[in-house]
Amino acid sequence: MKITVIGCGRWGSLITWYLDYINMDVTLYGRAESANMQRFIKERKNDYLELPESVKLSTDLSCVMDADVIVISINSQGLQALLEELKVFDLQNKIFVLCMKGIEIATGRRLTQVVNDNVDFSNEVAVWIGPGHVQELYHGVPNCMVIDSNNEEVKRTLVDTFNSELIRIYYGQDLIGNEVGAAAKNVIGIAAGMLDGLGVSSLKGALMSRGTREVSRLIKAMGGNELSAYGLCHLGDYEATVFSRYSHNRKFGEMFIQGEKYEKLAEGYYTVRAMMNLGKNYGVDLPISRAVYEILYRNKAPKETLNGLFARSIKNEF
């Protein structure tokens, strides 16, 4: 199986390393002007890992033409633009695997919908999501993830091929729930970081419980299985997002509260805008997401806004 990975950032490079680790024929694509790609070409490493010589590097997007599987790991809001670039190659009979989490802000489309709207019907699409940090996986710390697709044969092929003792991969059973849960997880991560920044980290337990319930309601309203929120796509990813020092979203939330600028990508910053639109469109109350949105985009006072979550009217837990 020949695989091209598009995206030479932290996660894209880890997926590339992992696919080579399990003996796949893998090429990593990055733009020629990308500082990450320039360093890989020069040194074959970044701040997190080193790629072996068996991994091919390319700055020519046409490398996707030889691939059976195209793995994409980029900023979710840039997916539409990338797919427009790929149209010139008239790709057919490929499997697109999205190792990224988000909802398109402008349209509310899930990322698999974005792909399906832009590629030939002969192509298939899957998502590969779940907990894990580059710093841990690269050093042999195992974790569990999930792959999901509307095509059962594609799903089983990917899971059976990519599974290993380092990453145990489960068969996903709800593409809508897995995509929405994975995207929303980053918003909860930002909220967790804000609690850290305010010095009330003990509230993370309540955040996890209520956050999962909030997201489960949205998944159900969108036609998915609400139990997906309690799986690897969302609740199962909380340790890596809500508590870990490696979590970009948690760190972003913490530094935002402290008035410091965070330079790295925190997908939850964009996803929370999409969550507000989804909540409105599907008639679902999303109090945690709304609090994060108001703090980030409407300059609401963080302490008062987050306190407001706990001053809501008393009601049954479930």
Image (tube, grey):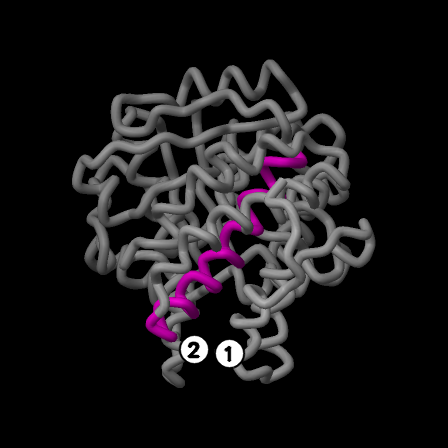
Q: Nearer the viewer, residue 181 or 311?
A: 311
Marks 2,1: beta carbons within 8 A: yes
All told, the count of numbered labels is: 2
Q: Which mark is residue 73?
A: none
The magenta stretch is: 176-199
The image position of residue 269, as x and y in percent, is 54, 66
Q: Amino acid at mark 2?
A: Phe
**Nearest the eye: 242 or 33:** 242
For the point 63% across and 28% down, the residue is 174
Tell me the number on the disc at residue 256: 2
Can the viewer see residue 301? yes
Q: Circle 1 sits on which residue?
A: 302
Q: Would you call the spot at circle 1 few (<14 residues within 10 Å), some (14-19), or many (20 or more)?
A: many
Q: Main secondary structure of the magenta part?
A: helix
The answer to if 14 sits in the magenta stretch is no
Expressed as whole percent of the image width and height from the top left, the position of residue 111 reads 64, 45
